[in-house]
Amino acid sequence: MTVALYPGTFDPPTLGHLDIVERGTRLFDRVVIAVGARIDKKTLLTPEQRVDLLRETVAGLGHCEVLPFEGLIVNFAREQGADVLLRGIRNSTDYEYENQMALTNRRLAPGLETVFLPASPDHTFLSSTLIKEVLAAGGEIEEFVPKVVAKALREAWQR
Ligand code: ADP
């Protein structure tokens, strides 16, 4: 049984994240989406909102669960019995950063492998940061995120 941990901030979860999750569930026996608290970074959605939205969005997918985490990802991976850290790669900038992180995590936790999935062509341009910028400027975000997420984002922005 191979367990993959997919860590991220997911502020907000996008269709690109979901694509990685879906493909992950076809490759691994269990996928745990680990939602980071990010005390270092101000988020638009609270950790609880991000966890709840992801749970709603992946409700129909088997072998998949969503959990909040704080601290070092390799420690959380160990607690969850994960064999693999799953990450998505959109472009060479992602690759530079992700590879550096993968090598660091390998030193911290030998045996825990990082697996990169290339973003699907329809999703390579999608980023949580840009979606928030479009929202802030009054643009349409509906085609970038699941419906429930778009609704929550509009409410969070109006508050
Ligand atoms: P972090 O703050 O850890 O980078 P994110 O929520 O931004 O968390 O992203 C989590 C993971 O999902 C990262 O591996 C990131 O590269 C990947 N990712 C982000 N957007 C996309 C996308 N549109 N398609 C595929 N993977 C993505």
Image (cartoon, helix red, strand yellow):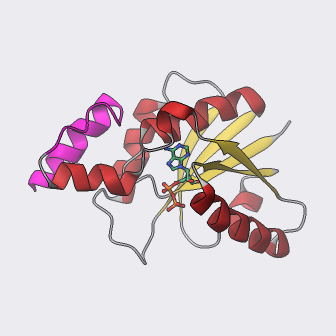
| Residue drawn at the location 22% of the way across and 50% of the way down | 134
Task: Assign the N terminus to one quadrant of the image.
Answer: top right
Q: Give the residue furthest to the right.
A: 111
Task: Assign the C terminus to one quadrant of the image.
Answer: bottom left
Say above or below: 119 vs 89: above
Say above or below: 42 vs 84: below
Could you tell me residue 40's position as x and y percent? 43, 78
- Whether residue 145 is in magenta: the answer is yes
**Image: magenta residue range:** 139-159
- Name the residue nearer the viewer: 136 or 83: 136
Q: Is residue 84 left or right of residue 38?
A: right
- Name the residue nearer the viewer: 79 or 38: 38
| Residue drawn at the location 29% of the way across and 33% of the way down | 148
Q: Give the residue furthest to the bottom.
A: 40
Could you tell me residue 18's position as x and y percent? 51, 35
| Residue drawn at the location 74% of the way across and 65% of the way down | 102
